Image: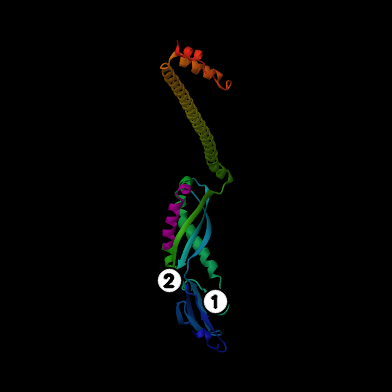
Amino acid sequence: MFEHIAKPLGYCYFKAAPTEYAYHFRNGVVLHEGQGIGFWCQLTRDSVMLIPLSEWDDPFTIQHRCRENQLVAVKGKILYQIVSPEDFIQHYNFSVHPVTRHHYTTDRERMVNRLIDTISDCSRVRIRESSLEELMNEKGELGEYLKEKVNERIGEWGMRCNWIYIAAITPTSPELLDALEAPYREKLLMARDEVEAERKMANIRYQRQISKLEAEARKQELAQQLELVAKEGMIRRERKELEWELERARLEELSKYPPGVLGLLALEALAKGNIGTINLTPELLQLLRGE
């Protein structure tokens, strides 16, 4: 609220961020301190120390000899933060200009270098007692070990290590590195060949499945055609039987007529469409009666 008040001559208003812890000194005496606080600062007599409380991360690379007396490089990253500003200012000077907030010292770089030196010192014995293969296979365990050992050292500085990640452990000798990578390259080639073989087998299985489905489809189609032919034959057979039945019924009906009527019917059928009128004479009637 005070930053809106007219600035007195030779003063400035300083406001720390919520993730910063600020100290306001005058003649070596702390006038104000706290996280995210604001205060008026006399430029010619006062000093401000600003301690960040958020997490920081910095990369590191260290080198030590392992049990085989091979020089190995350990690359990783450390995640840390300041947890006790009171203890921290006993070791590092993070004084800043009240207006520009530029640091007066290079203690930030000195702190990082000291952290890396601590990691190197804590890892020396562990690396010396381990083989190269053990180190390469236990990167996670090495990170947890270093985190515990580093915290034992930096706690008195008001700091805490939250995580140490080991990204790579490699020998510095190019010949040894190439020898170590050879089995890995061979595994990659074998894996590639296995993938290619599996792809070919999958393609063969797919083609077989397609052929099987096509054969089943052709078989089903042939069965349907045979069934259709059988149905058509049955229809033709039933039609023939019906025609025979009708013919037999007609013959039975015709057998009931006298021979003369049958002759007349035959003559009618023969002359159908060709004879317009038939005159029945007495002689023709006698013939039809069979007299």
Q: Which of 64 and 60 is in front in this view?
A: 60
**Residue 35: in magenta span:** no
SS under mark 2: loop
* Distance between the alpha carbons at the discs numbered 1 and 2: 19 Å
Image-based side of 143 in relation to 203, left or right = left
- Predominant SS of the magenta segment: helix
Q: Which of 15 and 166 is in front in this view?
A: 15
Say few, some or many: other residues with alpha carbon within 10 Å of mark 2 (under 14 / 14 to 19 / 20 or more): some
Q: Which of 157 and 36 is in front in this view?
A: 36
- x, y percent for residue 272: 55, 21
Q: What colour scheme has been applied to the protein in the rendered image?
A: rainbow
Up/down of 68 relative to 206, above or below: below
* Residue under numbered circle 1: 96
Region rendered in magenta: 135-151
- x, y percent for residue 225: 49, 27
Residue extending farthest to the top is: 291
Up/down of 53 relative to 142, above or below: below
Query: Which three-letter amino acid code belongs to the residue tagged 2?
Result: Ser
SS under mark 1: strand
Query: Which three-letter amino acid code belongs to the residue tagged 1?
Result: Val
**Residue 143: in magenta span:** yes
Say few, some or many: other residues with alpha carbon within 10 Å of mark 1 (under 14 / 14 to 19 / 20 or more): some
Residue plotted at (48% across, 62% down) = 79
- The mark nearer the N terminus, 1 or 2, is 2
Label annotation for residue 104: none
- x, y percent for residue 182: 55, 40
Up/down of 86 relative to 174, above or below: below
* Residue under numbered circle 2: 84
Q: Nearer the viewer, residue 290 or 106?
A: 290
